Amino acid sequence: MIKESISVFFPLYNDEATVEKLVNDATSLLKTTADDYEVILVNDGSIDNTGEICNRLANENAKINVIHHEKNKGYGAALKAGFTNATKELVFYTDGDGQYDVKELSKLLPYIHEADVVTGYKIKRNDPFYRRILGRIYHWTARFLFCLRVKDIDCDFRLLRRSIFNNITLESDSGVICVEMMKKIQSAGYKIKEVPVHHYPRISGRSQFFRAKNILKVMAGLCKQWWKLVILQRYLG
């Protein structure tokens, strides 16, 4: 078992088909790998049965806590809620759509003693062709603009030391939060370790990231963070 305590959280939006398996897999793993843990479910204004399932799971297990957003605030807002409400020394999160296997957290845990952040990178992206193309364009654009040195900026399978957030503050409410977070972590000098993880086809629902309205919002957010984290820092710091 790891000596540190760990918070595991899932940002959720209309994930009624996957949330229960995620929680069951997480608690099954944590019982054998951690001395102290909690599971946090961030229901970001779901309009299906996600909220009801979360409440039932929390009623069945005292180690599960639920945060409900009355309306959908965005992926970044869900991540910020998870990080803010985590109480343990380590924090792990992955998406609620089930495209990552939460049990592969066991691949990340051994490296947290030599790094501040252990982040996954997809061995193979199992998405439709157009999403793979858009994903690569986004990835290389973000790497170039922000001088990022990570292999997979949008692999949301990360284990971090909670103390990191004593020194960095996250602002973005959209999916841009991943670029913002990794840029701030890199600029602050924290050590990052990358580990390959599997990525699986989505079994239900649809991605919010690749809708036209959200793409425009993400692009605007990316430009805003580039101005603040690269241009202003270059001239002010």
Image (tube, helix red, strand yellow):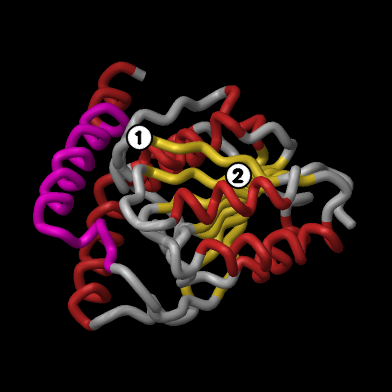
- Stretch of the chain drawn in magenta: 206-230
The quarter of the image holding the C terminus is: top left
Residue 215 horizontal/vertical position (percent)? 15, 53
> Do we see residue 116 in this rendering?
no
- Depth order, front residue of 9/184: 9
Identified at 42% across, 63% down, the residue is 152
Counting residues from the start of the chain, the first of labels 2 and 1 encountered is 2
Residue 194 horizontal/vertical position (percent)? 57, 62
List the residue tagged with mark 1: 70
Give the number of the mark in front: 2 or 1: 1
- Depth order, front residue of 167/46: 46
What is the C-alpha distance between the residues marked 2 and 1?
17 Å
Identified at 30% across, 17% down, the residue is 236
Image-quadrant location for residue 28: bottom right
Give SS at disc 2. strand
* Amino acid type shown at disc 2: Ile
Residue 46 horizontal/vertical position (percent)? 35, 50
Q: Is residue 18 above or below residue 74?
A: below
Q: Is residue 14 left or right of residue 119?
A: left
> Do we see residue 43 in this rendering?
yes
Instruction: Give the prevailing secondary structure in the magenta stretch.
Output: helix
Identified at 20% across, 33% down, the residue is 224
Q: Is residue 47 left or right of residue 113?
A: left
Q: Which mark is residue 40?
A: 2
* Amino acid type shown at disc 1: Glu
Residue 212: in magenta span: yes
Q: Residues within 10 Å of mark 1 (few under 14, many from 20)?
A: few
